Image: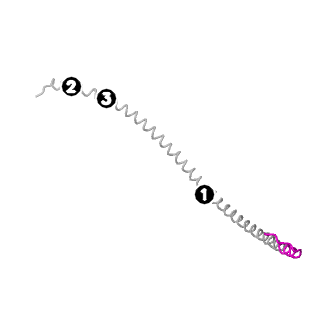
């Protein structure tokens, strides 16, 4: 059986082995506290970032709505301008047809007169 002095010697051996572990545990706890502080700082920054990101998303959504409204207005304007241009082109086409027909008839009349004059004067027709 172990005597009191044997037990004290074993206790001293255990204490000698545990003291460095206790010191290391204290150091570890200090480092954990520092780590927790840094982790809290990171969490605060992430929360701040999420708030800013949410604000940016709201602004982007607002911008997209405004852009959609502008796009709709531009589409209507372009459609209106396209319709007006087509009407203008049709008007120009009709006027050109009138002008071409007028000059075509004038050309035919001048050719007839020229043929009569050439025939009356006995001239050889010019080749066209």
The answer to which of marks 1 and 2 sits earlier in the sequence is 2
Residue at coordinates 48% horizontally, 43% vertically from top-left? 47
Crowd tier of the residue under label 2, counting other residues whose Cα lies within 10 Å: few below 14, some 14–19, many 20 or above: few
Q: Is disc 1 in contact with disc 2, using a CB cutoff of under 8 Å?
A: no
Answer above or below: position of 94 versus 50: below
Left-right relation of 7 to 84: left
C-alpha gap between disc 3 and disc 1: 64 Å
Residue designated by label 3: 24
Q: Is residue 90 found inside the magenta-colored segment of the image?
A: no
Residue nearer the viewer, 6 or 76: 76
Q: Which mark is residue 13?
A: 2
Left-right relation of 55 to 31: right
Q: How is the image coloured?
A: one colour
Residue 97 in the image: x percent, y percent?
76, 70
Residue at coordinates 86% horizontally, 76% vertically from top-left? 119
Q: Quadrant of residue 110?
A: bottom right
Magenta segment, which residues? 111-127
Residue nearer the viewer, 77 or 122: 122
Residue designated by label 1: 68
Residue 16 in the image: x percent, y percent?
24, 25
For label 1, the SS is: helix
**In front: mark 3 or mark 1?**
1
The answer to which of marks 3 and 1 sits earlier in the sequence is 3
**In front: mark 2 or mark 3?**
3
Residue nearer the viewer, 119 or 116: 119
For label 3, the SS is: helix
Crowd tier of the residue under label 1, counting other residues whose Cα lies within 10 Å: few below 14, some 14–19, many 20 or above: few
**In front: mark 1 or mark 2?**
1
C-alpha gap between disc 2 and disc 3: 18 Å
């Amino acid at each position: 059986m172990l005597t009191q002095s044997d037990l004290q010697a074993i206790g001293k051996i255990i204490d000698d082995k545990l003291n460095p572990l206790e010191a290391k545990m204290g150091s570890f706890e200090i480092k954990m506290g520092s780590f927790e502080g840094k982790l809290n700082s990171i969490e605060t920054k992430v929360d701040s970032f999420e708030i800013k990101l949410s604000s940016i998303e709201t602004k982007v959504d607002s911008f997209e709505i405004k852009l959609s409204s502008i796009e709709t207005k531009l589409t209507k304007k372009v459609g209106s301008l396209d319709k007006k241009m087509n009407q203008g082109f049709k008007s120009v086409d009709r006027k050109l047809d009138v002008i071409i027909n007028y000059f075509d008839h004038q050309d035919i009349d001048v050719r007839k007169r020229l043929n009569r004059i050439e025939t009356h004067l006995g001239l050889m027709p010019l080749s066209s």
